[in-house]
Image (cartoon, helix red, strand yellow):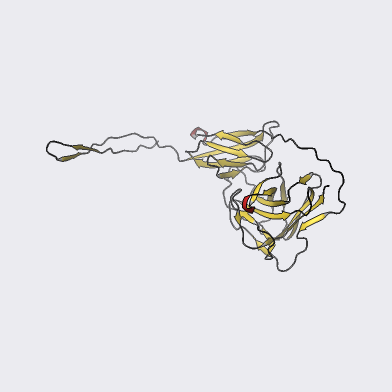
Amino acid sequence: MVLLIKFHKFIVVNSIDKTILFITLFFISIIPVHSQTISIKGSILNIETSEPIAYASIYSEENQFLSFCNSKGEFYIEIPSIHQYITVKSLGYEDQKISVNEDDSGGFLKIHLIPKTYYMDELVIESRVSKKIVIGDTILQGRIKSLSFGSVPYASIAIPFKFQEYPASIQNFSFYIESNHIGNFDFRLRLLTKGKRGKPGTDILNQNLIHHSNQQKGWVNIECKDINFVVSEKNIYLVIEIIQDKDRNKNPIYEAFSTPGFGYSENQKEKIYIATKPNTWNLSKKLNIIANIRYFHLE
């Protein structure tokens, strides 16, 4: 506890002789000053199974991104002591708002998330086109350059795709790595709608799709045949979100890290967006990220 001396100044006016007298009195006020930040460790768990939830996101009371948990559901955050709540979010789960205070500082929190229940309309498939449709780039043409985020606390890129025919059953995603000096890296795949003013909108998927790669230079392929991906939107964004899987009991997520270099050409087809904070999208310069989607049209 720190003691602050607070000075109170009083002004007294003598109305008889119009003389202003300044009398300054000093009072000593004892004011407790608490720690400016709260440090909290913890884990995110499924309330039904008690299994850890990988890569859940943690936000402040003002909806500012604070941290990811790691693949074991562990997290570590440092927040100003004026904060009263944090919110935990993960695909496929209800958001959970948690009250925190200085008593939690240095402690360990176990936060349980409730799985969402989805009510799906029946999808009747009368026939399936035998020929697989490909949208995007499959052949490397011209000079391929490398897009890297440098040293950032978060990195995500949104690539636009337009389905020729839909609903579509997605079979495969691919994107091209032009350079990789960081070795192994984890990433999350997301599909987003095309939102207001053409920006990436809301999540189409209701589950986390985490993948691992050590590709140095070449295609990264993700097979989706067994996941039953059906998209009913004409325009979507394929989002590649790089994940830093640290020991969250020791290191905060917001330590900067480097990313692999995504292959791109300058022949712009559509606008791409990048984010160095979750869901904070900024329009990138004119370039075309090399990626493709293979799908069947469902009739």
Residue lying farthest to the left in this orientation? 17
Residue 114 visible, this angle: yes
Q: Nearer the viewer, residue 200 or 141?
A: 200
Q: As drawn, is 287 to the left or to the right of 39?
A: right
Residue 179 visible, this angle: no
Q: How many marks?
A: 0
Q: Position of residue 82 (x, y in %)?
A: 47, 38
Q: Nearer the viewer, residue 29 or 237?
A: 237
Q: Position of residue 243 (x, y in %)?
A: 65, 49
Q: As drawn, is 135 to the left or to the right of 105?
A: right
Q: Position of residue 144 (x, y in %)?
A: 70, 66
Q: As drawn, is 77 to the left or to the right of 128?
A: left
Quadrant where the image shows the N terminus: top left
Q: Position of residue 298 (x, y in %)?
A: 82, 47
Residue lying farthest to the bottom in this orientation? 142
Q: Nearer the viewer, residue 123 or 154?
A: 123
